[in-house]
Structure formats: C-alpha cells, structure tokens
Image (spheres, rainbow, N blue to C red):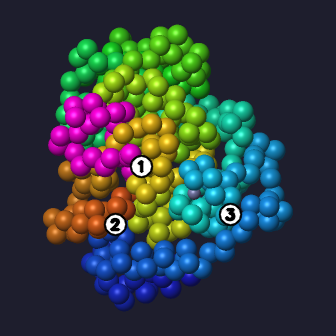
Amino acid sequence: MVSVKRAAARLLFGSRYDKVPWGQRVYVRPGERLIREAQWRIRIAGAKTVPLAEYQRKVPLGEIEEFLSCMMCGESHQQPMFEPTGGNGWRYRVVRCPSCGFLYRNPNVRPERLGDLYANSYSSFLTGAYAANRQRRYRLTMDAFSPVFDDGKGRRLLDFGCGAGLFLELAEQRGFDAVGVDLSPDSVEQANARLSHAKAYFGAPEDVPEIAAGGFDVITLWSVLAHLPRPLEDFERFRSLLAPGGVLLILTVNAGSLLLKAYESAWSGFTKNHLMFYSSRTLPTLLRRTGFAGVAYAPHYGDTIEAGTTQLPEAMRARLRRAVESSDGGNMMRALAFADAKAIEKWGGPLEVRGLKE
Ligand SMILES: [Zn+2]
C-alpha cells in the first residue's frame, strides 16, 4: 500500500520533493493543501455520529479510563475518528465533537489516575540531547510574541508543568521572577539543580502558598494543554492566578494541522499521553468560558524554518509559509491569551488579537 502511494506521489509530483523532509512535503507540494483539506471534509461528512450511550456499549473501557462528553460545548454525541497506536502496545480512540469540532480521546483518562501515565520516569526523556532543541523552540516561540518575553525584569512568571526546568532557566536569564510546578518529583529535583534564582515546586499550584497567592504577569504552558483532563477547571485557576494585564502562553499540538489531515491516526500529535487536541477554532471556547478577554496566534512553520537551518530552497520555504498561513495548519499551535482589556492594551499592539466576548 505504501509503495502504491509512493508511486502515485511520484507520478503527481516527480522526484523534486524526495529530499524534502517528510513533515514538510504536505506543505510544499503544489496543490496538496487543497487535496488534504477536501479529504478532511469528506472524512468528517462520512464519519458516523453516535449517541454517547451507544458509543459506551461498543467501546471497551480501561481500568484508569472514563467516558466523556465534549468538554468545550457539552455535546454528548460522538464521531469516532482515529485509533492511534504506538510502542509497547498503547492504543486509544479519538472522537470528534459533531457540534464544535473538538477532538478528544474517548475514553479519556480519569484525572485521579493521571499519575499512571507518568509512572515510568517521564523526566528522563526531557533532558539530554532533547534539551537544546527544546530551548531553541522556547526561544523561537518567545520571539514570535515579541516583545512580551523580551524583558522579564520586575515581572512574575509561573511555568505550569515545568518539567526539568528547561524553560525556567531561560525565564530567569531574561530577568523574570520565575517559579514552576510539576507533578513529577524527579523533574522538580532536576529543575532545582539547574536553576539559580527560579524555583520549581512539586504538586499543584494550590499546594504551594507562594504560587496560590497569584499575581502572575505571565503563565506558560509548554506542551501541557493536551495533557489536561479537566481543562476548564485548570484554566479557571490560571485566570485567577493572573494579575491584571497578565497573559497566558500556550504551545500545543495543532488539531488543525495539515499533517493530521494527511496522516490521520499516524499523526505525530497523537502521542501516548495526549488527551485533548485543540485548534484555533476550539481553543477560544475554553478561553472564553474561563474569563479570558482575547487571544492571538503565531503560526508555526517548524523549527528548522524558523531557526534558519532548513535546507529547503527559498521558493519551497515561501510555499510552506503560505500553506501554513492559509490553512491555519502548522503542526503546532502557539497562542497568547490575554486576561483582560488591560492585557490587550499593553501587549496586543503588534499582534492580531481576536476578542473573546460573546
Ligand atoms: Zn463540542
């Protein structure tokens, strides 16, 4: 099957794109964006919509799992879409909400059993060779929202899900008065060994008096949003922890990605521990319902394009940028949420801010 597809692609596009990295071809080959988007619309139109009760009868439920309705809009009907699988035999089901388009794992993981997903030393893969790439990605994202992260002097920052402190290290270098929380004790220990002024804590924000007091100018969620089983509760808390004029930064996999439309269940965003998948269509619901005033996006073109290390010729780079922008289809979503009108006034200037009032 794969070789048939490859032969078809060769016929359509010639050998010109053979050297283009796999994750970029979809964006670069002429006309492919339109084909993938049409495929996606057909896929959605053809996907069955079933009531939750019927879905529950048909789908097995794991010990640490629970069935959900859509957390964004409350819709209980389900469109079964994908069944990602991976190493060591993990497998789960992803449904689409027929009302608002939200993609989520269903059955999902019960919040009190979330720890089970991270039992096997989750921290180890967050360090080592991985660290330099991660920090580069953080810098590129901060730059994309300049000047919000340019100068942290006199500003308080909370990194939620801080892991081994790779971002906190950059935050303290930029002058932020930074703290982090994480649910992995190993990671918190590694973070505190790495940091000089910033401090990482084990637990939830409300467990740490210094954090529970709130008044943060910036909260960051680096690859955390897709892991939250109760996003509404968490975002209500984030909103209350922000000072007037505060902002919340989100980096997560983009459920509007052209790569998802192309590769479906094999999409790289369906990783073992991801629970919910947001796009610029569905994230505003979460933000609006939890009291945020506005949101701005920075399209994600991929690390090598943004860092200038790509081998792609300029014409292909330009086509990739156009494909990402016109489809809102980069593989990651980068969003900056504004707590209130003051935040929009203070930081929204160079950005295209979309208001969230109903
Ligand atoms: Zn929904």
Rendered location of residue 208, percent (x, y): 54, 13
Q: Relative to 355, is 204 above or below? A: above
> In the rendered image, which residue does mark 3 sit on?
77
Which residue corresponds to the image point at 34% horizontal and 61% vertical from the top-left?
328
- Which amino acid lies under the numbered mark 2 shown in the image of this protein? Ser
> What is the spatial separation of the Cα atoms under label 1 and label 2, in whole angstroms?
25 Å
User: Which of these two is toward me, 231 or 138?
Assistant: 231
Q: Quadrant of ligand 1?
A: bottom right
- Residue 232 seen by the camera: yes
- Which amino acid lies under the numbered mark 3 shown in the image of this protein? His
- Residue 191 seen by the camera: no
> In the rendered image, which residue does mark 1 sit on?
358
Q: Quadrant of residue 7?
A: bottom left
Which residue corresponds to the image point at 28% horizontal and 79% vertical from the top-left?
30
Check if mark 2's residue and mark 3's residue have beta carbons within 8 Å.
no
Identify the mark nearer the N-term, 1 or 2: 2
> In the rendered image, which residue does mark 2 sit on?
327
Query: In the orientation shown, which residue stands out farthest toward the bottom?
Result: 11
Q: Secondary structure at mark 3?
A: loop
Rendered location of residue 346, percent (x, y): 22, 31
Residue 61 part of the magenta-drawn span: no
Q: Secondary structure at mark 1?
A: loop
Q: Relative to 35, is 313 above or below? A: above
Q: Residues within 10 Å of mark 2 (few under 14, many from 20)?
A: some
Give, as a single range, the part of the protein colored magenta. Answer: 332-358
